[in-house]
Amino acid sequence: MIEIKGVCKSFNNLEVLKGISLTINDGEIYGIIGQSGAGKSTLLRCINGLEDYQDGEILIDNVLVSNKDSKVLRNLQKQMGMIFQDFNLLTRLNVYENVELPMKFWGINTKSEEAKKKINELISLVGLDDKKNARPSELSGGQQQRVAIARALVLDPKILLCDEATSALDPSITKEILTLLQEINKKLGITIVVVTHQMEVVKQICQRVSFLKDGQVLAEGKPEDLFVHPIKEVKTFLQDESTLLPEAGINIQLFFTDKTSEPVLTKMARELNVDFSIVWAKLEDFRSNIYGSLVINFEAKNKEDVIKYLEKENVLWEEL
Ligand SMILES: Nc1ncnc2c1ncn2[C@@H]1O[C@H](COP(=O)(O)OP(=O)(O)O)[C@@H](O)[C@H]1O
Ligand SMILES: [Mg+2]
């Protein structure tokens, strides 16, 4: 378990983390989302002890992350693998040697059968069996990130920290890498912390997410909760498209969760004898649960009936 309690961090006079508190459970895929400059990378670097912090506590399984005791810190760091946006592979080494590198760094005998087996298994796991001897320059971005993932797992970490790991990849490759991370989470039971500015990433794999702005956690919850009832700042971040609305009549946004669906609308039109126009509609996919959101416009005289009906049908709604 990762416990972050009131963590504050400044660079000279610049306060970058302003009392961050959150808890990440074992085996969870946890997202930290926010705009560039929000403090996401700094927080991740504090978690793995690459940065020191001035106030608060970060505990990994009840052990304090602190540079006061370098032996304790090194042991903690061994339990955390990390991957980055730009892969950070060594260009003069091939795939096998890149994955082997952390073992060498830790003085582990990489010629042993056990070590060789581990390296080969990980290369298999990330789907690069036929690329063992390739150099990074001979690989696509997605393949390079696969190497980085194998390398991050070679010391059997409990936690995998991902800093914008898919931000340099196109959408279809992003999906493949996220699917791989999910597999790793399931197969190896590793806790994964995903730092990203991409809502799509959080929606696809995170069980819970924190929204970070100006060094503070402004919202926390399941991705679908953040999305269905976003606070103002999250709305702005998502650049909600509900800008162009008809001026006449009433505009109501409906959220369809997996328990509700569009037939509610046609039924409502029939039962209340009310005409709606659909202003815009969008479907969102959260870890295979479909959530829809829809804005309808209708005459003001029907407002009371419509709201009553929506309440009765347990449809989430918001007047715009
Ligand atoms: N080593 C550093 N020295 C000074 N300022 C830094 C340093 N690293 C990050 N910052 C500043 O801290 C703030 C948060 O940065 P960062 O954690 O990288 O945000 P994010 O990852 O959310 O984009 C930014 O204003 C950035 O300029
Ligand atoms: Mg960053």
Image: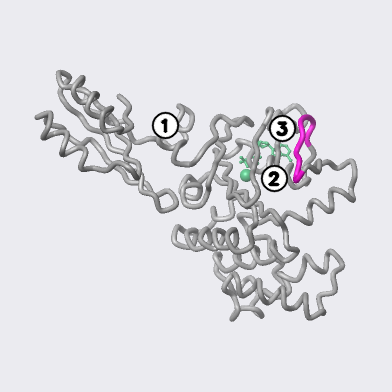
The residue at which mark 3 appears reads as: 5
Disc 2 crowd rating (10 Å Cα; few below 14, some 14-19, many 20+) is some
Percent position of residue 270, x then y: 11, 35
The residue at which mark 2 appears reads as: 1
Q: In the image, what residue type sits under mark 1?
A: His
Disc 3 crowd rating (10 Å Cα; few below 14, some 14-19, many 20+) is some
Among numbered discs 1 and 2, the one appearing first in the sequence? 2
Judged by depth in the image, the label closer to the viewer, 1 or 2, is 2
Question: Residue at (33%, 32%) from the top-left corner?
Answer: 316
Is residue 219 shown in magenta?
no
Q: Quadrant of the N terminus?
A: top right
| Res 229 label | 1
Distance from Cα at disc 1 to Cα at disc 2:
28 Å
Question: Residue at (9%, 29%) from the top-left corner?
Answer: 273
Q: Is residue 130 above or below residue 155?
A: below
User: Is 312 left, or right, of 39 in this rendering?
Assistant: left
Percent position of residue 231, x then y: 46, 28
User: Is 300 left, or right, of 214 in this rendering?
Assistant: left
Q: Is residue 102 visible?
A: yes
Question: Residue at (73%, 30%) from the top-left corner?
Answer: 8
Q: Is residue 265 above or below residue 95?
A: above
Distance from Cα at disc 2 to Cα at disc 3:
13 Å
Range covered by the magenta-colored residues:
53-61
Question: Residue at (72%, 78%) from the top-left corner?
Answer: 117
Among numbered discs 3 and 1, the one appearing first in the sequence? 3
